[in-house]
Image (spheres, grey):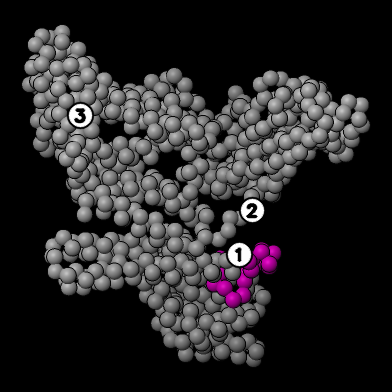
Amino acid sequence: MTPWRLATLVVTFTLACASALAQPPMSPGRAEVSIEWSHDGYAPGDRGAVAVVLDIEPRWHIYAGKGTPHEPESYIPTTIDITWPPGWAAGAMQWPEVHEVLFGPPGAQELLKVYEGRTIVIVPFTVDGSAAPGSAAVSFTAGYQACDDQVCEMPRDVILDETVKIVQDGTSVTANSDASLAAMFEKALAAGVSTAPQITPPEASADATPAETASARRKFFGIPMPEQGGGAMSLIFLALLSALGGFILNLTPCVLPVIPIKILTIMQHANHPGRTMALGMWMALGVVAFWIALGLPVALFTGVTDPSRLFGIWWVTLGIGVLIAMMGVGIMGLFTIQLPQAAYAVNPRADTWWGSFVFGVMTGVLGLPCFGFVAGALLAGVATMPPSWIMTIFTSLGVGMAAPYLVLSAKPSLVERIPRTGPASELVKQVMGLLLLAAAAYFIGSGLLALIAEFPYVARQLHWWTVALFGALAGLWLIIRTFQITPATETRLFFLVIGLLVGGVGPLFALSRTNKARGEWEIRQAAIAESGGASYIHGLWNDWTPAAFEQARVDGHIVVLDFTATWCVNCQIIKSVVLDREPVRSALNADDIVKFTVDNTSTTAPGWEFMAELGQSGIPLLAIYTPGKDEPWLSNAYTSQQVVAALNAARDNRLAGP
């Protein structure tokens, strides 16, 4: 089995395991979009106005500042696109005033311009003078991303198709009865209709905050461009950075040794310096053409669609991160890639311009085993950029890689100064591998954040999926190596079964725990919605907070506290075999009992201080409080019988009173 085949199997397995998580239906958007017209009908040539109304939920907002959908690291602005009937003219969109809010976690907040509450965008228009009486279709697309003060939901596009009545001249029409809208429509109609409709929110004001300015800058693998918005200076900076990267690729073991050979081959065919320079230039153009050919498909893709939305899908981003990580460890020497023998058989003559050009193309092709990892990661990293940026990056990479051939063909005596392959070139590969792992960490981290945002119940199961992944890799590797080592059918079948068992136990266990967590999360969400936001819920493990704990005590309930941590294996085991099984499970779900999970995963968790007040220092720990009594029943190692007896004793003591 080839390394790439192995890589494909691993990535496919990872995505299949992740896709196995049952996905609840997408929640409704935080903004309800509707359309209001100034009149219930229009005559040919009439001027009118339409309102796009976004009713945003309390405590939520939609971003109104700079940025484009091609900037995944910037905040996504609110946009409205309207498809008018042929011949209709639309004026500039009139957006409401923006509000400023602080967004982000404490210590890293940014001041953003947003829309809140009822947001109304008015668009004046003129009906085609030759429109026939009847109806006309108008399509609206409202794009927005809703955020509260710390988190953002997935971007949404709401599409509304409207039908407008076209009446004959002189036919009476009715104006919109909403008084507030009528004033806005009158103002819009007074402004007239221009030929350049505005389809995005207005630019931020000149006094924009530094945080807004920084967020509007484009970035390349985290490196901010020198100009806001991506002007000429940014493209020049990007070109120079990419050219440097292309030059460094020449130092890899697959490329460095062949540079002198190729230059000497050209010199043998050229016979004089001028022709050597010409053939060297054609060879350099071949190298550049190779990189342009790699960039064109990506540029064409971004030109016909909005790929930034693709990176909002958690399993896409996570899968790209895993693939880049495999490239990183591959370039560091874990495995190697061999091109098909047909590629090595291509040997163009370098005595013509066309032969030298193909010579340069093959230089790029045959170097893929060393820098193909970088090219693959680059394809993922630039997929959200505009086509002009993508082609600048790939063309400049080619120029940087081709530069040595131009210099050496102009002055062949420099060939003697080219370093030979050895530890230095291997070091270059290793550094490239580490940089790829850094890029992989970005994509994997982004994918995990998106996963947790979409499925909050997965957050505390990620460590089990990590265990499952490595267990699955162990089983897969056992099977692959067994088939490579021995042809014996019996041995292969035996270790095939062993490999499936080793590799399958972890994913099945992680899937079981995730499905259980999902069920509990859905029940909790439904109960919270039904209770109107109560601080605790009966029958479920509530997240412990001092306020909720005290409220349950004040309300006269028996309170059960399970002190635990994600890294505490004993805690997970004792909860699974005692608290989550009968008869304890039913006993804990009684109406007079409130149960809390005190998560001490972090060393700074407040639960540790609470434990110290109880005179305890280690977990697992179970505490059962009787109403009206301050001293709880405590145990670090308990049985089902002991827990049931402690609950019954708490109930009896409560009934007996002080």
User: Mark 1 or mark 2, which is nearer to you?
Assistant: 2
* Residue at mark 2: 28
Magenta range is 525-545
Q: Is residue 535 magenta?
A: yes
Verify whether residue 516 appears in magenta.
no
Residue at 54 percent of width and 77 percent of height? 560
Mark 3 belongs to which amino acid? Thr
| Circle 3 residue | 363
- The numbered mark, 3 or 2, whose residue comes first in the sequence reads 2
How dense is the environment of label 2, judged by Cα within 10 Å: few (below 14), some, or many (20 and up)? few
Q: Quadrant of the C terminus?
A: bottom right
Question: How far across and how far down the image is residue 288, in percent?
Answer: 28, 24
The residue type indicated by label 1 comes to Gln
**Which residue is rendered at x = 33% and y = 27% of the image?**
292
Q: CA distance from mark 3 to mark 2?
A: 53 Å
Q: Which residue is labeled 1 in the image?
A: 525
Mark 1: secondary structure: helix
Q: Which of the 4 quarters of the picture holds residue 343?
A: top left
Residue 214 x, y percent position in the rendering = 49, 31
Q: Between residue 311 and residue 540, name the one nearer to us.
A: 311
